[in-house]
Amino acid sequence: MSARFWSRSRFTFHLKCDTLVNNMSESFNVVIVEEREKPIVTMLEDIRASLARDWRTYWSAASKYEVMCGLDKFVVDLVAAECSCRKWQMSEILCPHAISCITFKGLDLKSYVADCYKKDAYLKCYQGCSSSNLLQQKTITKLAI
Ligand SMILES: [Zn+2]
């Protein structure tokens, strides 16, 4: 099977999706197997602590930054909207590395959200649907973007 079907390094940026398989919940369960035995508050706090990573951001050149955590290291270009992890380019959803750079520089995260995830795109997508008025009244008002 060609690597373009199973390797993120070979995916195109056209589809805006970096999900390769549908067993993400199983992977998550493996990670939290010890926490699942704890009382609910302790479990949630331990899961939160295990997911939170201390990303350190360093300005590199012009619009480029290096983001490091332990041995992991990524290069982010805020102008090109690219990260070496490729998740930002693939889904247009900000990866943790890009978020780290944007907050490091004190910029507005909302300005980096892709148009396809904004309220106008949502409304345009569902215009003409019979329940669109209901969606506008109940759901859209909750969207911040
Ligand atoms: Zn990234």
Image: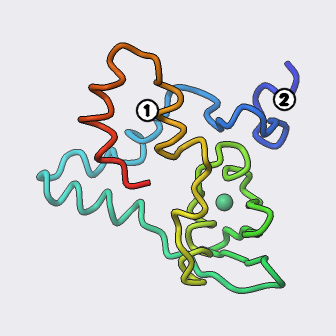
**Kind of residue at badge 2:** Arg
Q: Nearer the viewer, residue 105 or 23?
A: 105
**Kind of residue at badge 1:** Glu
Please give the residue where the numbered disc 1 appears in the rendered image: 26
Vertical comparison of 61 with 134: above or below: below
Quarter holding the C terminus is bottom left
Q: Which mark is residue 107?
A: none
Label 1: element kind: helix
- Name the residue: 73% across, 86% down: 59
Give the CA distance from mark 1 to mark 2: 24 Å
Question: Please, which residue is most extreme toward the right here?
Answer: 2
Q: How is the image coloured?
A: rainbow
* Quarter where residue 137 is shown: top left
Residue 103 image offset from top left, x and y in percent: 53, 77
Q: In the drawing, does residue 54 fall left or right of residue 32?
A: right
Q: Quadrant of ligand 1?
A: bottom right
Question: Please, which residue is most extreme toward the top here?
Answer: 130
Q: Are marks 1 and 2 in contact (CB under 8 Å)?
A: no
Quarter holding the N terminus is top right
Residue 83 image offset from top left, x and y in percent: 73, 61
Please give the residue where the numbered disc 2 appears in the rendered image: 4
Vertical comparison of 38 with 7: above or below: below
- Name the residue: 53% across, 31% down: 124
Q: Nearer the viewer, mark 1 or mark 2?
A: 2
- Name the residue: 48% across, 69% down: 53
Mark 2 burial class by Cα count in 10 Å: few <14, some 14-19, many 20+: few
> Sequence order check: which comes first, mark 1 or mark 2?
2
- Name the residue: 46% across, 44% down: 119
Vertical comparison of 97 with 101: above or below: above
